Image: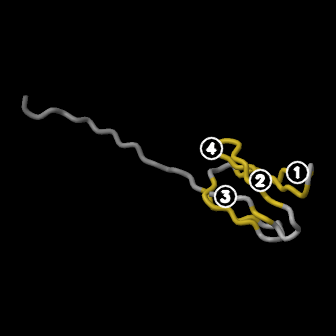
Amino acid sequence: MAKAAFLADGSVVIPVWETQESVTLYRLRGPGHIERVGTIPRPVDLMRVASDGRRVVVSTREFQGDIWLARIERVGH
């Protein structure tokens, strides 16, 4: 799960879950100075931010499942 990241310049990058399927990153530079960095349009498992704030490594997940249908018949009444 992604957590807040403290940067070398004293600012903080905070992930905010806009929906269950997307995370928006905000950078707080000081009181009243909030900057929207961007949105990751997938569920995030892990997030690492470089100490200079220039790079973010994100691990996302995407469920791809199969649906199986079976017809069950009674044998012997």
Query: Which is nearer the eye, 14 or 75?
Result: 14
Q: Which residue is mark 3?
A: 2
Which callout, 1 or 3, points at the residue further toward the start of the chain?
3
- Based on the displayed image, in which of its 4 quarters is residue 28 positioned? bottom right
Structural crowding at the residue carrying mark 3, measured as other residues with C-alpha within 10 Å and reported as few (<14), some (14–19) or many (≥20): some
Identify the secondary structure beneath mark 1. Answer: strand
Mark 4 vs mark 2, CA separation in Å: 14 Å
Indicate the position of residue 72 as horizontal and vertical percent values.
Answer: 22, 35
Q: Crowding near pointer 4: few (<14 within 10 Å), some, many (20+)?
A: few
24 relative to 69, above or below: below
- Report, in whole angstroms, how far the alpha carbon at label 2 lies from the one at label 3: 10 Å
Task: Kindly give the residue lying farthest to the left in the view shown.
Answer: 76
- The residue carrying mark 1 is 34
Q: Residues within 10 Å of mark 1 (few under 14, many from 20)?
A: some
Horizontally, residue 19 falls left or right of residue 66, namely right
| Residue 25 located left or right of residue 42 | right
- Coloring basis for residues: secondary structure
Secondary element under disc 2, as helix, strand or loop, is: strand
Decide: few, some or many residues near mark 2? Use Cα within 10 Å; few <14, some 14-19, many ≥20.
some
Foreground tag (4 vs 3): 3
**Which quadrant holds residue 7?**
bottom right
Q: Amino acid at mark 4?
A: Gln
Residue on which disc 2 sits: 25
- 4 or 2: tag closer to the N-terminus: 4
Q: Quadrant of the C terminus?
A: top left
- What's the residue at 86%, 62% (across, down)? 11
> In the rendered structure, which disc, 4 or 3, sits on the residue that comes first in sequence?
3
What residue is pinned by disc 4?
A: 20
Amino acid identity at mark 3 = Ala
Contact? badges 2 and 3 (CB < 8 Å): no
